[in-house]
Image: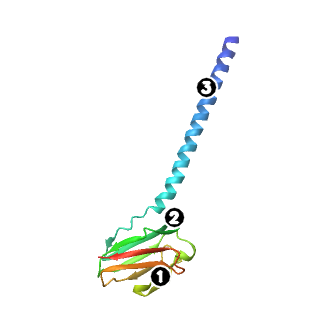
Amino acid sequence: MADGARAKERDFPMKNTTIFIFAFLIIIAGGIFLFTKGEAKQDITGNVIANNEIQKITLGIKNYNYYPNTIKVKAGIPVRINLDESVRGCYRSFVIRDFGIAKRLATPEDYVEFIPSKKGTYTFACSMGMGRGKIIVE
């Protein structure tokens, strides 16, 4: 029986090591999931999606500014811009002066819509001017 007890003693540290490694891997995987999940929300391309003749653009926040902060659209086709759930505070008061737009987009379902008639570069911002970006109309 002494040999059986020694065998159990030798197996025990091995089990602890295995459990430790398994727990460590779970923690690492969880950390990767949390960090990439947050980045995925921010990683909005800003590419124009022509859907039912409307160019849809969703903006988020990254590094204390709208993201993407440069968007390209086509002239003469309606543009719809909404803000995702990462946008907070004054950034929800969305302004495009050249198109006469000043609206609080309280939820991600709210949007502004306009038809850019002239090619050029126009600015958008929050109502306080803290967040800024540009719209390039091609």
Q: Quadrant of the C terminus?
A: bottom left
Above or below 102: residue 29: above
Q: Is residue 120 visible?
A: yes
Q: What residue would you read off at disc 2? A: 63
Q: Nearer the viewer, mark 2 or mark 1?
A: 2
Q: Which secondary structure lies at badge 2?
A: loop
Instruction: Please tell me which residue lies in front, 99 or 133.
Output: 133
For the point 67% across and 11% down, the residue is 3
Above or below 88: residue 100: below
Residue 126, position in %: x, y?
51, 78
Q: Which secondary structure lies at badge 1?
A: strand
Q: What residue would you read off at disc 3? A: 14
> Do labels 1 and 3 touch, CB within 8 Å?
no
* Left or right, 55 with reference to 33: left
Q: Residues within 10 Å of mark 3 (few under 14, many from 20)?
A: few
Callout 3 amino acid: Met
The earlier-in-sequence mark between 1 and 3 is 3
Q: Determine the CA span between mark 2 and mark 1.
A: 19 Å
> Do labels 2 and 1 touch, CB within 8 Å?
no
Residue 15, position in %: x, y?
62, 28
Q: Determine the CA span between mark 1 and mark 3.
A: 63 Å
Residue 48, position in %: x, y?
34, 70
The earlier-in-sequence mark between 2 and 1 is 2
Residue 122, position in %: x, y?
38, 80
Q: Residues within 10 Å of mark 1 (few under 14, many from 20)?
A: many
For the point 49% across and 58% down, the residue is 39
Q: Which mark is residue 95?
A: 1
Instruction: Please tell me which residue lies in front, 3 or 69.
Output: 69
